[in-house]
Image (tube, coloured by chain):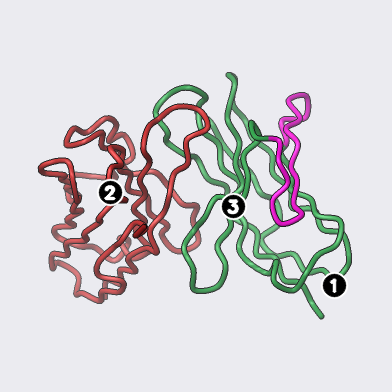
Chain colours: A red, B green
Amino acid sequence: EAGVTQFPSHSVIEKGQTVTLRCDPISGHDNLYWYRRVMGKEIKFLLHFVKESKQDESGMPNNRFLAERTGGTYSTLKVQPAELEDSGVYFCASSQSQGAGNTIYFGEGSWLTVV
Amino acid sequence: AQRVTQPEKLLSVFKGAPVELKCNYSYSGSPELFWYVQYSRQRLQLLLRHISRESIKGFTADLNKGETSFHLKKPFAQEEDSAMYYCALSVYGSARQLTFGSGTQLTVLP
């Protein structure tokens, strides 16, 4: 069974440019999450989809970040325009359900460097 | 709001020695606690959760509600245990948003 897949694995862009990160969750997982770790900080929650609906987007830092999950399958996270402080690792994760005992599976992360 | 604290950024022990990675949390309700591990060049993966009360790869962790701690322990460390360890918390029974600690890089020396 394929795990959570993220693309690109690494991206270097200039300040002001746009980057779109993609996440393919494990097949059949309705729950999809985005997290990020910026330099020197903890891994922080960004948002949570249940199928195509945003269940919780309380962690999105500002309106330069836009996440979508059309059709409830893969998800994209767009940063526009990117700023230097957006550099870090963006993790996607998925789970089958939200109940106790359910496991959240993480992707390998997308490393973003804004120069 | 909930918070997870891992006081040690770096921890080095010799092979065969006991190891304890500390984790303290603050949350007024009933949390669910986890340990995640990230080996070099691999993805973040669940090591164990408190509700399972299991031992994975020789590691155990007991939730101490009085001390609000969930320390990870192993009696005899192995070189392959070298990795980044994250303690995490989620609000029990609700959406599965995880709050992570800052992580502890464990190095097991030969």
Chain of the residue on which disc 1 is drawn: B
Circle 2 or circle 3, nearest the eye: 2
Please, what secondary structure does the residue beneath circle 1 have? Answer: strand
Q: Quadrant of residue B83?
A: bottom right
Q: Amino acid at mark 3?
A: Tyr
Image coords of residue A83 (percent x, y): 24, 63
Give the vertical position of A74 relative to A57 (above or below): below
Residue at the (69%, 39%) spot, across then down = B24
Image coords of residue A57 (percent x, y): 27, 35
| Magenta segment boundaries in residue numbering | B53-69
Q: Secondary structure of the magenta portion, mostly? A: loop
Residue at image mark 2: A27
Residue at image mark 3: B86
Residue at the farthest top position: B29
Is B11 contained in the magenta span? no
Task: Check residue B14 in the rendering and tell me which mark sits there, or answer none.
Answer: 1
Residue at the (32%, 61%) spot, across then down = A85
Chain of the residue on which disc 2 is drawn: A
Circle 1 or circle 2, nearest the eye: 2
Q: Amino acid at mark 1?
A: Phe
Density class for disc 3 (Cα within 10 Å; few <14, some 14-19, many ≥20) is many
Asked if badge 1 and badge 3 are on a common chain, one would say: yes
